[in-house]
C-alpha cells in the first residue's frame, strides 16, 4: 500500500439506544412495542422500532403515545445506566483505535484511516467486527456508516436502521448522496426540508443543479457550506478528547425552531457549563467566547468577546452570553441552532489580580468540586454531548 492510508471514517449510531439498554437488561422486552419516557416530563425519549411502526416517535408527549399505541410498554427513564452502557460501547471502539470522537451518548465517529493502511475490504471487515462485538458483549444494536469523511459516514449510518451497515466507497460520495432525500443532509430539519421542497429541491442532486446566485438567494451566507455538503465534501477531523484542543465548542440543533431569547440564553449558558469542566480538566484557560446563531435557512451570524485575561471559570463568561446573543441574533426570527465556542486557549501561568485572587481561587475550587460530583454521578466528560441534547432528543 501507499504511505498515506485510505481515509476511513465510521459513524456509529446505536439503534433506539435507551430502549435497547432496557432490552439488554430485560430481554423480555425484546421485539415489543416499548418506549422510554419520563412520566413527570411526559415526553417519550426513545421508542423501539415496533413502537415506531405503531405511530410512536420522539419527542412525543407520553399521554399521546399511549393513545396512539394503547399496548405500548412504557419504561421510566432511568438515570445512570444509559451513561454506563455508552461508556462500555465507546470503550469497545477505543480498543480498535484511540481516534474515537464521542458525539453524544449513542453516536460517535471512529477514524480507521491511520490504523493500518487497510484496503477497503479490510476496513469494512474491521467495522463489521465492531458491530458484532457491541452486540455480543452489550446486546446493543448499532448502525454503522463507513465512508471517507464524517459527513458522508453520518448520512450512511442512518440509511438502513436498525442494524444498518452502509459503505460508501472512496470517490463515490457525491454519487451516493445525489439521489437521497434532501432531509437526509445534516442540518436540514423538517421545516427546512419542507421549504426546500416547495422550491423544487427535493433531492440532494437538486442543489447541485442550481447556480451560485440561486443558492445564495436560498441559503444566504451558508450557501457554500450547503453546496459542499451536497457534494459530500467534509475535511473536519475526528476529534478525540485526548488531543490538544485549540478551542472548545458545543452546538445544539433544535428539534423545533426557538424564538424565545431567554430559552436560547439558557441553552448557551448550559454549553459554558458543559465546556468549562473539560477546560479545567485539561489544565487550560480560555480568553474568547463566540456565540453563533443560525436560522432554519442556514443563514448565520456570530459575535465574540475577548476577556482581558484568560479564565477557566463559568462566571467569567456568563455575563457575555446575553449581549453576544443579542448582537448575533439580529433578525428576530426563530433560530434553528446555537453554538458556543471558547477559544484563545492558554496554559501559561496566569497573572493573579491581588485583590480578586482569593475569591477567584475559592470559586475555582468550588467549580472543581462540582466537576468531581458530576463525574461521580456519571454525567461528566463522556456525557457532555448527551446532557445538552437532553433526554427528549435521542433520534435513532
Ligand atoms: Mg441513535
Image (tube, grey):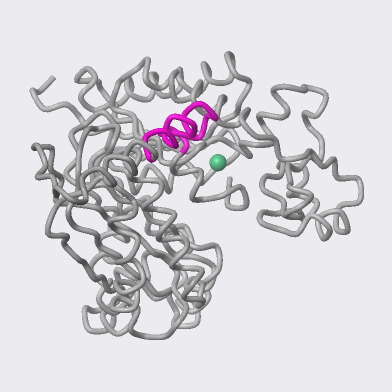
> Quick one: 206 or 317, which is closer to the camera?
317
Residue 9 falls within the magenta-colored stretch: no
Quarter that holds the N terminus:
top left
Say if 391 sits above or below 323 in the image. Answer: above
Residue 340 figure quarter: bottom left
Left or right of residue 337, residue 65 in this image = right
Image quadrant where residue 140 sits:
top right
Q: Residue at x 77, y 28 (%)?
A: 30
Q: Quadrant of ligand 1?
A: top right
Seen in the image, is 53 located left or right of residue 395?
A: right
Horizontal and vertical percent for residue 68?
Answer: 85, 58
Q: What count of labels does the image hold?
A: 0
Residue 244, compared with residue 218, is above or below; it is above
Q: Which residues are magenta?
A: 367-383
Residue 381 magenta-highlighted: yes
The residue positioned 29% from the left and 22% from the top of the image is: 98
Amino acid at each position: 500500500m501507499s504511505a498515506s492510508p485510505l481515509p476511513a471514517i465510521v459513524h456509529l449510531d446505536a439503534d433506539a439506544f435507551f430502549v435497547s439498554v432496557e432490552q439488554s437488561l430485560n430481554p423480555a422486552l425484546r421485539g415489543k412495542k416499548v418506549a422510554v419516557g419520563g412520566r413527570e416530563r411526559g415526553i417519550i425519549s426513545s421508542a423501539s422500532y415496533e413502537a415506531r411502526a405503531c405511530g410512536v416517535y420522539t419527542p412525543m408527549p407520553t399521554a399521546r403515545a399511549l393513545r396512539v399505541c394503547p399496548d405500548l410498554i412504557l419504561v421510566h427513564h432511568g438515570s445512570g445506566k444509559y451513561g454506563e452502557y455508552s461508556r462500555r460501547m465507546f470503550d469497545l471502539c477505543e480498543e480498535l483505535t484511540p481516534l474515537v470522537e464521542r458525539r453524544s451518548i449513542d453516536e460517535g465517529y471512529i477514524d480507521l484511516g491511520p490504523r493500518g493502511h487497510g484496503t477497503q475490504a479490510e476496513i469494512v471487515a474491521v467495522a463489521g467486527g465492531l458491530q458484532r462485538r457491541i452486540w455480543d458483549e452489550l446486546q446493543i444494536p448499532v448502525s454503522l456508516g463507513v465512508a471517507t469523511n464524517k459527513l458522508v459516514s453520518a448520512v450512511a449510518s442512518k440509511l438502513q436502521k436498525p442494524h444498518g451497515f452502509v459503505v460508501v466507497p472512496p470517490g463515490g460520495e457525491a454519487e451516493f448522496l445525489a439521489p437521497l432525500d434532501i432531509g437526509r443532509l445534516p442540518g436540514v430539519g423538517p421545516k427546512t426540508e419542507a421549504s426546500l421542497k416547495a422550491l423544487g429541491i427535493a433531492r440532494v442532486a437538486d442543489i447541485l443543479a442550481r447556480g451560485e446566485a440561486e443558492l445564495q438567494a436560498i441559503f444566504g451566507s451558508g450557501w457554500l457550506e450547503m453546496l459542499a455538503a451536497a457534494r459530500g465534501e467534509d475535511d473536519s477531523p475526528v476529534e478525540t478528547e485526548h488531543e490538544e484542543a485549540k478551542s472548545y465548542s458545543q452546538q445544539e440543533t433544535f428539534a423545533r425552531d426557538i424564538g424565545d431569547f431567554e430559552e436560547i440564553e439558557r441553552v448557551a449558558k448550559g454549553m459554558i457549563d458543559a465546556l468549562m469542566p473539560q477546560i479545567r480538566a485539561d489544565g487550560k484557560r480560555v480568553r474568547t467566547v463566540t456565540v453563533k446563531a443560525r436560522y432554519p435557512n442556514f443563514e448565520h451570524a456570530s459575535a465574540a468577546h475577548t476577556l482581558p485575561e484568560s479564565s477557566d471559570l463559568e462566571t467569567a463568561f456568563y455575563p457575555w452570553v446575553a449581549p453576544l446573543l443579542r448582537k448575533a441574533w439580529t433578525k428576530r426570527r426563530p433560530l434553528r441552532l446555537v453554538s458556543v465556542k471558547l477559544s484563545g486557549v492558554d496554559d501559561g501561568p496566569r497573572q493573579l489580580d491581588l485583590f480578586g485572587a482569593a475569591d477567584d481561587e475559592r470559586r475555582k475550587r468550588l467549580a472543581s468540586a462540582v466537576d468531581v460530583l458530576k463525574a461521580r454521578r456519571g454525567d461528566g466528560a463522556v456525557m457532555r454531548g448527551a446532557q445538552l441534547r437532553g433526554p427528549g432528543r435521542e433520534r435513532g
